[in-house]
Image: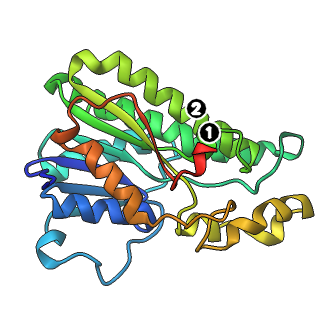
Amino acid sequence: MTWNLEGKVAIVTGCASGIGLTTTRLYLEAGARVFGIDISPFPEPSPFSKAHSHHFYFHRADLTTPGACEKSVNQCLSKTGKKIDILANVAGIMDSFEAVHKTKDTTWDRVISVNTTVPMKLMRAVLNDGGMLEQKSGQIINVASKAGISGAAAGFAYTASKHALIGMTKQAAWRYHHDGIRVNAVCPGGVATNIKSSIKSENLDQESLDILKPFHDLNHTPDGGQTISPEDIANAILFLSVDASRNVSGIIVPVDNAWSAV
């Protein structure tokens, strides 16, 4: 089956690497115009073909700064000249696997800001300024985590942020289902992306190091299963973005090779 996004405009956060970069590529290959946002620079040379690069717009921004989400959506509209059809909230950060009694205010604030508040602000902006409510159509896909459907081994702040994102997904799906707007979430398991390598081991105490140790193997999940590739997650995001999934809304899709089944 061909996933067709011809004529669609999509926003993808975290587009410079990992799941966000792969999602961007799949959207472009399906015919969408993509406005990618990332706090990091985009890789050079471009990993996209010349034909696809003409339909990609990169916007470097720290979305946690005041007004950045709204400005980014308006920038997308000015670049594409169209209303926004798809929002893929992919960007996220991890904590350092701290339990609540060791969670610092700075860690909590940063993780909640990136993983929960930014997706909320972007959802609000595409519904209003982005035109989804006006055009009575749109797809929003939030990338949560296995940690959002269980207690998991991740830290307190990260787990809380992903549980919140799932709650946001379900509430918004119900609230806007009469408006033709679908909202779903994908929950990756262990994925071979730089979100793991970005954890600074030198900042961890021994308890956190012991918890984190199994996660450092990018070829396997902590329970011995195979690590998921960014493309596995991006394919699920793509499916939730196309008309073939037109009656799928409010669902939480684990992509973790049955890790969450136990």
User: Which three-letter amino acid code belongs to the residue tagged 1?
Assistant: Ser
Question: Is residue 168 shown left or right of residue 54?
Answer: right
Which residue position is annotated with label 2?
164
| Relative image position of residue 226 (x, y in whole percent) | 55, 67
Label 1: few (<14), some (14–19) or many (≥20) C-alpha neighbours in 10 Å: many
Tell me whether circle 1 and circle 2 mark residues in contact (CB < 8 Å): yes
Image point 11% across, 73% down: which residue?
51
**Residue drawn at the location 82% of the way across and 72% of the way down:** 202
Q: Quadrant of residue 212?
A: bottom right
- Rounded to the nearest angstrom, the CA distance separating label 1 from label 2 is 5 Å
Q: State which quarter of the image contains the C terminus.
A: top right
Q: Which residue is mark 1?
A: 161
- Foreground pick, 109 / 191: 191
Closer-to-camera residue (149/98)? 149
The count of marks equals 2
Near mark 2 (Cα within 10 A), the count class, few <14, some 14-19 or many ≥20, is: some
Residue furthest to the left in view is 7
Q: Position of residue 237 (x, y in %)?
A: 34, 49
Seen at 74% across and 50% down, the residue is 153
Q: Where residue 76 appears, x then y in whole percent?
A: 24, 49
Q: Is residue 199 left or right of residue 188?
A: right
Mark 2: secondary structure: helix
